[in-house]
Image (spheres, rainbow, N blue to C red):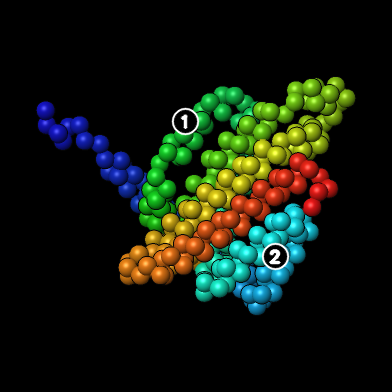
Amino acid sequence: MNPDLVQFSPGAYLAPAVDWLNTNFHPFFDAVAKLIEAVLGAIEAALLYPPPYATIVVAVLLAALFVSVRVSVVTAISLTFCLLTGFWAASMQTLALVTVAVVISVSIAFPLGILASRYKKFEAGVRPLLDIMQTVPPWVYLIPAVMIFSLGRVPAIIATIVYGIPPMLRLTTLAFNQVPKDLMELGHATGTSPRSILFKIEIPSATPTLLVGLNQCILLSLAMVVLAGLVGAGGLGAEVTRGLTRMEMGLGLRAGLSIVALAIFLDRLSKGALDRRRRPGMA
């Protein structure tokens, strides 16, 4: 059998589609890129304008006030470590990238998750797509993003958004499916409007699972943003890439440990919010 007859090349079909998008939707993509760059620039400026120690103190106080004292200690240690490794600016750039990506991912996944919990046919249709999205290697998402938006932070954000949507969407659907039926029946029996049922019954009951989904979205987005250093996203991912290409073990190790510190900070912050939700009133 001729091996050419059984070969399958998705790129032969996708490349013309990407070229068509670039030709016909360039103004739209350019506007999206400018908007993302503007938001990223504003967040980075807010994080980097104050002296590092001032930013750390504010973060520690906010963590102690809104989460717990234990999380505030982890915040102090993690952020101070990023400062002492010499990667404060890169760490804040990575934090800005993760923040923007997570906000957009949640904004997309949350309503889709509610829709999937309402309509089982929609859930059945989207499930195979989510399975594929979660099994495809992360760096594959960078390829179409770079083809459309070129190199830089914008394709990194786009790829991170796509990578962060599936876990949040799955857990949003699960959270709303687990809302006690008796609470829903009580709301309907008392004549409560669907809007009130959503905001006063469903969302409060689903919050613990939603926070777990947010935690997963944050950590996966951080991993993707670091990987996106390969396409010029900057931040700690760029430092890891620089250490790899130059074969500088010290540089790569310091950047890697800074990533670990940032991951611990974000993980404890999101989990601390979940624990506080489960045990109101405890510091």
Element at label 2: helix
What residue sits 70% from the left and 39% below the top? 208
Q: Nearer the viewer, residue 261 or 211?
A: 261
> Which disc, if any, is residue 147?
none
46 sits left or right of 217 in the view: right
Mark 2, residue position: 59
Q: Quadrant of residue 232?
A: bottom left
Q: Position of residue 197 (x, y in %)?
A: 79, 32
Q: Position of residue 259 (x, y in %)?
A: 51, 60
The N terminus - image quarter: top left
User: Is the residue under label 2 in contact with that under label 1 (CB below 8 Å)?
Assistant: no
Q: Amino acid at mark 1?
A: Pro
Mark 1, residues whose alpha carbon is within 10 Å: few (<14), some, or many (≥20)?
few
Who comes first in sequence, dot 1 or dot 2? 2
Q: Single out the residue that lies furthest toward the right.
A: 190
Q: Nearer the viewer, mark 1 or mark 2?
A: 2
User: Residues under labels 1 and 2: Cα distance?
Assistant: 40 Å
Q: Single out the residue that lies furthest toward the left.
A: 1
Mark 1, residue position: 128
